[in-house]
Image (spheres, coloured by chain):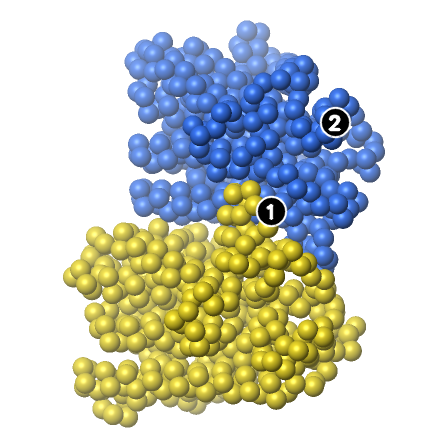
Chain colours: A yellow, B blue
Amino acid sequence: MRPWLCGVERGSVMGVLKPLSSRFTHPAQVVAIGFGLAIATGTFLLTLPIATTDGESAGWVAALFTATSAACVTGLAVVDTASHWSVFGELVIAGLVQAGGLGIMTMATVFTLLISGRLGLRARIVAQAETKALSMSDIRRVIRKVVLFSLLCEVLTAAVLTGRFMIAYDEPFGRAVYLGAFHSVMAFNNAGFALWPDSLVRFVSDAWICLTIAASCIVGGLGFPVVFELARSWRHPRRWSVLTRITVGVSVTLLVLGTLVFLLTEWRNPKTLGALDDSGKLLAAFFTAVMPRSAGFNVLDISEMHPSSWLATDLLMFIGGGSAGTAGGIKVTTIGLLAFVVWAEMRGEGRVHVGHRSLSDTTQRQAVTITALGAALVGVATYVLLALTPHDLDRVMFEVVAAFGTAGLSTGITADVGTAGQLLLVLLMFVGRIGPLTLGSALALNRRTRHYELPEERVIVG
Amino acid sequence: MRPWLCGVERGSVMGVLKPLSSRFTHPAQVVAIGFGLAIATGTFLLTLPIATTDGESAGWVAALFTATSAACVTGLAVVDTASHWSVFGELVIAGLVQAGGLGIMTMATVFTLLISGRLGLRARIVAQAETKALSMSDIRRVIRKVVLFSLLCEVLTAAVLTGRFMIAYDEPFGRAVYLGAFHSVMAFNNAGFALWPDSLVRFVSDAWICLTIAASCIVGGLGFPVVFELARSWRHPRRWSVLTRITVGVSVTLLVLGTLVFLLTEWRNPKTLGALDDSGKLLAAFFTAVMPRSAGFNVLDISEMHPSSWLATDLLMFIGGGSAGTAGGIKVTTIGLLAFVVWAEMRGEGRVHVGHRSLSDTTQRQAVTITALGAALVGVATYVLLALTPHDLDRVMFEVVAAFGTAGLSTGITADVGTAGQLLLVLLMFVGRIGPLTLGSALALNRRTRHYELPEERVIVG
Ligand SMILES: [K+]
Ligand SMILES: [K+]
């Protein structure tokens, strides 16, 4: 048992913000320090001349931006990935994505299990004794499961993509494996770097590639606790935990609504859906609805989409995907909890119920807190970026939400917001990646008191 | 005692939405029906040829839009008020503003007192007996106070304005009285119609006019319960209720922050603040910060302001002013309560405290509900108006928030969003005006159970 695992028991968020006054390192700090180190290492490697195709250093701003975008599995890019970076640079990017994705997933999964007390019998007994400490072997077991599952998904995705690149696009074996592996890592980790300057626009009508990548993004973005529970009991929705019910319910709702909105808005746009046949329209709209959950690829030219589609995408990117996965945003759990709070209040109910569980007041307040702080951060950053650049609100808000939600989509202004603007986006990606997780878990681990009106369930928020 | 005053005790919001199933008319319905009748009457009068300067009917869309904008004390206009409408038309507009302003104030004040149980000793005794019924004489007394106070404020404002128009602008007495009275009614009721095509831009350096109108807007927009309490005990802030503390605190904060933001963003803009000297800049920035609370006049050309100023204005208009006054928006109380919830959660406190009072869970959820539904409405309406018009997000969001918050400011596209767009704005003004009040009071009157951990105080939300 490590000291920091005791440390999570103590202290408020304010305490977390004063690390020097604490004898214990909070796990939130471990995450921040880990990501900081990964980004610093990545920045150093990407400034090396060997990292670029022309053999000249990329400069520290482009290197820092790219390293942050990769480690935070965002996918925003200030340079074209394939033409600017050498194979070495691309491997650094893929390595950062894999490390960032696995890092956030394992930490978040440990946090989630810590919070919901679902880490097997032994941990649950300990949790009932109110100490909630986990043994290192419990944690090792969980991390092993997460890593194995991730690698399995990535290998499967890479295999399908490689086959498709060989068969349909006549790529030689080595090149097809490289492309398949690179984009598989990007897809499962919800990082949107692509080795074509137009992202995946050339594959807009290729259902094999679109659906494989979309499936990989969705599984990676659901989050491990939910994926594990679905694997165990997908046939028995009544046994699902509140976390799984909300994640699946909100995800399906957003995917359906998103597809409908993009079909509606872009149907006649000759630069986007208008050029495709009906089944092609459906495929492209579905893919476009999956990507803001924060995968970040695109098969439609985003800069040609209607501003109302951008606004819908903003909302989807802000919400993001599931907790404890590779997705960003405030998370579907958070928005789902808020919806239940609003619904209960409209119906005049004294308590907020999800299924046969009652949501604690503090869980409700956590959802409010994460949403409010996220919205405030996006608002302030949009104001600053609007003031710094000549671009209009449409594109600036899209860029800010894409960075905060680590979605990585762009209307095309990323390279064109100046150094100050790019540093602001770097900050947003970092805070957007580790903020909701660390804030959510710090808030959830904050409280000792419980109410016993109905069995309550702690749901991780953010 | 009237049946509908008993009716407020029963039923959830869902019940309110099913009026035919109820034997009692909910006060929320009285408000909606009253506003509907006022708008219908106003629309009829404004379609008369006598209402326009050219003697031709304005057409039903312009008449409906103007009548709704006036009755909902918004101030958005699809035609130039002074040149398009005759004196008869202007009097109809002023009459609708006065009726709409007094109507919402009296109803909201009665609701607030009903909710907080502060309607004098007798009502309080009755309230403690859990019936909360008010006698008609109590209500008549409150309404009389509200009407007298409103008229007093309007007469004072009109007197200062009239004097200033005569002395500094050489207007003849009759014309000065007309201008003074018209703009005084507009200012106190937070409706932004002006009899100059550029609103009040010509008075940008006239501190008499700017400060008088700003003061009138602020007093009208604070809301009666707060104004009455300040009049009674402004020297003893420790005795203030939670409602007054939050309203004053958030209002002052927003006014100061707003002034600073506009100074910062527009300081060097030659089309706005850049043309003024330093004290002129301060005056204009302060006035510009007061107006989104939802007065709707402008001394700076809004279409020339920087998009980042528009975004800041959007936020101020969405929040609006105090509850139970003439201001619109989700109200400063709502946003203040949310801030206390977030702060308590960040500090890891089990209960949310404001001063020595504890906020009930249901009050917190009401604030969440009103903010969430308001944001959702603004989001959907912005999406629809973006799809309907060729304008960009900057201007469209500004227009939608100005309508929802009944703020009445515009970047200049109101006349240019088409009939469908204008009908959408009509709907937004109506819902923005009566929605937060009726939803807030319906939610607050919804609940019977109370918790007694600490003395709780019910704060009206919305
Ligand atoms: K991404
Ligand atoms: K107004």
Callout 2: chain: B
Callout 1: chain: A
Label 2 – label 1 distance at C-alpha = 24 Å
Q: Which mark is residue A366?
A: none
Vertical placement of residue B231 versus B347, above or below:
above
Left or right relative to A280: residue A422: right
Q: Quadrant of residue A150?
A: bottom left
Left or right relative to A250: residue B6: right
Q: Considering the numbered disc 1 on the image, is that residue within a helix, a strand or a loop?
A: loop
Question: Within 8 Å: ligand 2 and the Cβ of disc 1?
Answer: no
At which x and y percent is residue A68?
51, 75
At which x and y percent is residue A135?
65, 85
In this orientation, which residue lies closer to the viewer: A239 or A32? A239
| Quarter of the figure that contains the N terminus of chain A | bottom right
Q: Which residue is mark 2?
A: B124
In this orientation, which residue lies closer to the viewer: B131 or B65? B131
CA neighbours of label 1 inside 10 A, class few (<14), some (14 to 19), many (20+): some
Dots 2, 1 in contact, CB < 8 A: no
Residue at horizontal 72 percent and vertical 29 percent from the top: B129
In this orientation, which residue lies closer to the viewer: A377 or A84? A377
Residue at horizontal 50 percent and vertical 74 percent from the top: A225
Amino acid residing under circle 2: Arg
Q: Which residue is mark 1?
A: A350
Q: Is residue B9 visible?
A: yes
Residue at horizontal 39 percent and vertical 26 percent from the top: B65
